[in-house]
Image (cartoon, rainbow, N blue to C red):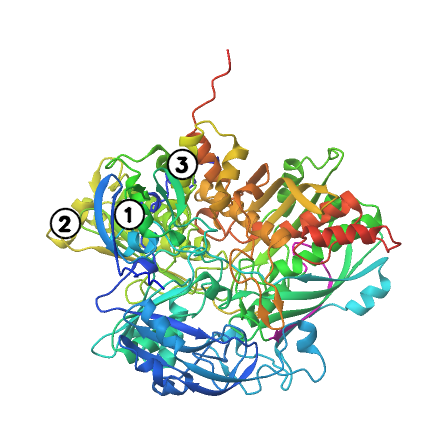
Amino acid sequence: MSVIPIRSSSSVRCTVNGRPVALEVRPEALLLDVLRDRLELKGARRSCDMQVCGACTVLVDGAPVSACTYLAVEVDGREVTTVEGLADGDRLHPLQEAFIDHGAVQCGFCTAGMLLTAKALLAEDPSPTSERVAEYLRGSLCRCTGYRKILDAILACATPKVAAG
Amino acid sequence: MTGHPGVFRIVGQSVRRTDALEKVTGRARYLSDMELPGMAHARLLRSPYAHARLLRVDVGAAREVPGVYAVLAASDLTFCDPFYGPALRDRPLLATEVVRYEGEPVVAVAAVDEATAAEALDLVEVEYEELPAVTTLEEALAPGAPVVHTGEPLAGHFSDLSSLRAKPGTNICHQFDYTRGDVAAALTGAHLVLEDTYTFPRVQHYSMEPHGALAQWDDEGGLAVWAATQNPFSVRSELAKMFALNASRIRIAVPLLGGGFGGKTYAKLEPLAAALARVARRPVRLLASVEDAFRTVRRCSARVRLTLALHRDGRIAALACEADFDIGAYADIAPRVIQKGTYTTTGPYRVPHVKLHSNAVYTNTTPGGAFRGFGVPQLVWGVESMMDVAADRLGRDPVDLRRQNLLAHGEEFAPGDTPVDGKLEESLGRLAEAIQWSTAAAPGRAKGIAAMMKASVAPSVSEAIVRLHADGSANVLVSTVEMGQGARTVMAQIAAEVLALPLDRIRVVPPDTSITPYDQTSSSSRSTTMVGRAVQEAAQDVVDQLRKIAAEMLSEPAARLTVLDGAVVSDEHRLAYPDLLDHHFGMRGGELIGRGVVAPGRTKAALGGSTPFWEVAMGGAEITLDEETGAIAIESYASVSDVGRCINPQQCEAQDEGAVMQGLGHTLLEEMVYEGGQLLNADLAGYRVPRAGDLPPHLETLFVENGDGAGPFGAKGVGEGGLIPVSPAVGNALARLTGVRMRELPMTPERVWRALRARTRPTTNP
């Protein structure tokens, strides 16, 4: 009978918002806790804690993941983007501008996850329909806005579809 | 978007939220982001039983765990008065002798980290003797039912609730009665008398940020609590009583809230965090999970029996109501919820004969409390459904029948209370137009409407301080909690308007009871009206001081001076604020302080105070139905609110869009389900809130703006109203589409499907 040794910690090397990060993390450490408590990136938030609400959504290699249920060790060798990495210095990302202009921000608890989910959607489909946006946001809850202004903000950042010639 | 160019500079403009930038960049800070040096993390052990006697609570092993700083059970709470509650102090910090609902806190631990706290809780041994539980109104009101509370609870801290009328030996915690005219005689003389019963479910606020508190005692015995609360002053009152402290020794500071919706009114976790911090001798942060929130507070469910009588010509003759509200295991603010909700059963209509009775009924479930709408949605669901039944029976158009019965502007709602302050007909007309009521719905579609009128809390008090600094910038000190509704932006707009300063020179200080002045609560749609008026007064106070200083400098009468672009101006002169202050103080320093107080006081109205304004909202839905599954789809929804004037039109829209979608939740999706005393769906996997895909393809929010509100610049409250008509509007549309009348919420596919199946059997007119 062989005993599998449980390592008390693992090395993780990744980039977070474009900067290299090297950390020792416990194997059960969640990405959300590492971001919030170790890297002081508080933008991703804990709400449902079960991958339903999207308040903790961050991008790993461009894909939206729920950091509340994502192991930190899994980001080894990958790129993590949080809401803190969206703006270019003082220049806001167009989605951030659009969320402000359209009044898509109320309590703000869902905002980081919404922005990153929207970024992933527009990378995948630069000209989504309203239905497509709503469908893509199925894992991103908001209890304040009623979603109308969030959809408007995202659609305002879509590339207009060029009529087929 | 509505603007008022030429009249106001900043009021009426959809300026950017002052907190938007920090929120889109992730820099906004909430309670869960706050840490103090040496801070401990708390966790709670909750009862697995709905009702049980605590035979033994052994925390010995938990105390031995390294890194544990405090372990508390009820018997350890000798250093404070362990009971709290705004209406009745019926709630112990930790279950004492008995547990009264599944999820009630029994043991609290503070430790070096959450994992250690959890480890300690695993070592706590509790022996329960299960008792028979009551988890429904039927069970709780049955003769000989197990009684949730056997002792005499202590009065809470609200004068309007000092005369709580419990029925000893039963589960009735409070009763409310209101009578006007002679209902019995009116029923005899009426042409049509309708009687029916409607029920409203237990629903959960699900503010995305659950409850939380961070408490710290100082070396001199003072207490500071950072709390995710909608009313820091009420929390202060509770803590002052529990820990025998002067109000001046307590500081309640409130960061940004991740939503509230009423669920963060009154003390929730703050007393436990304070007790733990006292024993741990270090700061303690207690953060609830979403599962905990489901076991902290919910909306009071209700069963409402209504009798609606009309004359042949359509005039309402009488309305009688017998309502039972399930308020769960502890009273919280539910006695006021049932009073206020029941009091406005007649809504926006002229009803000469009224007889209302409601009971607040304890059950062994999560305590019921405040939730957007505060008792009104439970009543409006039934009344507005029955208005459509009445229209059908009388052969009348539902819009027309409502219009005939609307109260007029200035008409008395009830003796001693505030007369109607809006033009209700205008709201109804705008709604009918928005949903194209006069145009028949396409095949397979139907429309329905509903209306509501709601009182705000009274009496109540709001105070404001405006400080104009030597550089001509200003701080606004108010205790309005920013929970997403945009109050901080609106207060800044009001101050900027009066002070004639650009918005970026105004900074609204976050609530802190040791710094910002008294405000009763950020709820009841009251902040713009009450706090807004206090800010307007305080800013005007500063302006008056500025004009007086300028008058002395210029030897001109103050009456000839006005403020413009950060200066006092006359026909010939312009004196910038910094120069005025420099002259006044003889140096570049000092500040002008303005004060505003809004305190309408007690009146002879039935609830002890006259509502500061009437919140008026109407809604219209157009739906389709999948008859195979019973699934309702809302294709189009229009919401009309009479807000007097929009201070920030975009934020008004945002309030009502959010309100409609939250209303859509309890209309179609949401219900906390209990079985055998156990809450089965205390998480977001089992409890389904509206998602983006549930947004109606067309959602329109409209505002009636006659500048006739009691708030600043003729504004009044918004925020709750839009939620309330949703259920009856959808139910009425369903009845028009199918002939099926739903009396139970949410209208899930299964319930609708069953009702459709039952329709084929002979039934009475829906």
Q: Secondary structure at mark 3?
A: helix
Q: Residues within 10 Å of mark 3 (few under 14, many from 20)?
A: some
Q: Residues within 10 Å of mark 1 (few under 14, many from 20)?
A: many
Where residue B355 sits: x, y (%)? 72, 68
Using the image as rendered, state which of residue B182 and residue A35 is in the foreground: A35
Chain of the residue where label 1 is placed in the rendered structure: B
Disc sitting over residue B583 in the figure = 2
Where residue B409 sits: x, y (%)? 62, 50
Residue B116 horizontal side relative to residue B418, left or right = left
Labels 3, 2: one chain: no
Q: Secondary structure at mark 2?
A: helix
Residue B59 horizontal side relative to residue A53, left or right = left
Find disc 1 in the rendering and name its residue: B506
Q: Quick check: is B654 in the magenta stretch?
A: no
Which amino acid does the dot numbered 3 rest on? Ala
Marks 3/2: CA–CA distance: 58 Å
Asked if the residue at tag 1 contacts the one at tag 3, i.e. Cβ–Cβ closer than 8 Å, the answer is no
> Where is residue B527, by image quadrant?
bottom left
Which amino acid does the dot numbered 1 rest on? Ile
Asked if the residue at tag 1 contacts the one at tag 2, i.e. Cβ–Cβ closer than 8 Å, the answer is no
Find disc 3 in the rendering and name its residue: A120
Can you say whether A95 is above or below B101 in the image?
above
Where residue B458 sits: x, y (%)? 51, 65
Chain of the residue where label 2 is placed in the rendered structure: B
Residue B153 horizontal side relative to residue A67, left or right = right
Using the image as rendered, state which of residue B199 and residue B428 is in the foreground: B199
